[in-house]
Amino acid sequence: MNRILRWAAAPLAVAALAGTTLLPAASASAATGATAMTTYTIELISLTCNKKQDVDKDEPQLFIDGVSKFGPGSMKKGDTAILTGRSATFTGTATMELFEVDNGQDDFLGSAQVTSAQADGNVHVATFDFRNHAKYTLLYEVTS
């Protein structure tokens, strides 16, 4: 292994001293001209139940890009779940979806798109009220 490393290190050192690169032309241009994708973070703050769907308490579950970030919880009208410390990373856009968990098929309560443009230092609001079955408000921030 050490012989291989010494063999590989010598041409790299010569190339560095000469100011050239040993990368193929396509890789060299990609390495110098490419910009890395910026990663953004959704920082969840709170989820408030404004109107519940079930007769008893709702069991909301929040997903970001298919990954559960909260729930299923147990909420009634007026309840607020504090979600600080929960986050998700994305590049470009992310999709947040809220479901009400049932014994049978879960009920879709809505979705919201998060974009990199929201990385502006402000608190953002997503409202989930698909077909007026229930209404939830999610507060979150986006950072880069």
Image (cartoon, rainbow, N blue to C red):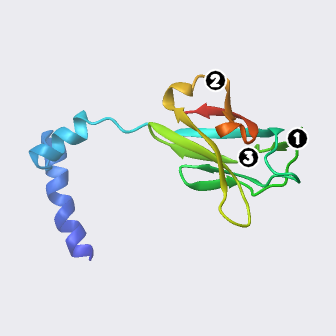
> Which circle's residue, 2 or 3, is located before the other in the chain?
3
| Relative side of 108 to 82, left or right | left
Residue highlighted by disc 1: 77
Amino acid tagged 1: Lys
Question: Disc 2 versus disc 3: distance between alpha carbons?
Answer: 17 Å
| Relative side of 98 to 84, left or right | left
Q: Residue 135, image x and y in percent?
A: 75, 37
Are the residues tagged 3 and 1 within 8 Å (C-beta)?
Answer: no
Quadrant housing the C terminus? top right
> Which circle's residue, 1 or 2, is located before the other in the chain?
1
Judge whether residue 39 can be spotted in this image. Answer: no
Question: Disc 3 versus disc 1: distance between alpha carbons?
Answer: 24 Å
Q: Nearer the viewer, residue 131 or 137?
A: 131
**In terms of image quadrants, where is residue 129?**
top right
Closest to the camera, between mark 3 and mark 1, is 1
Q: Residue at x 15, y 39 (%)?
A: 19
Quadrant housing the N terminus? bottom left
Residue highlighted by disc 2: 121
Q: Residue at x 88, y 42 (%)?
A: 79
Q: Residues within 10 Å of mark 3 (few under 14, many from 20)?
A: few
Amino acid tagged 3: Gly
Q: Nearer the viewer, residue 103 or 65?
A: 103
Are the residues tagged 1 and 2 within 8 Å (C-beta)?
Answer: no
Are the residues tagged 2 and 3 within 8 Å (C-beta)?
Answer: no
| Relative side of 92 to 113, left or right | left
Q: Residues within 10 Å of mark 2 (few under 14, many from 20)?
A: few
Amino acid tagged 2: Gly
Location of residue 51 with respect to 2 vertically, above or below: above
Residue highlighted by disc 3: 85
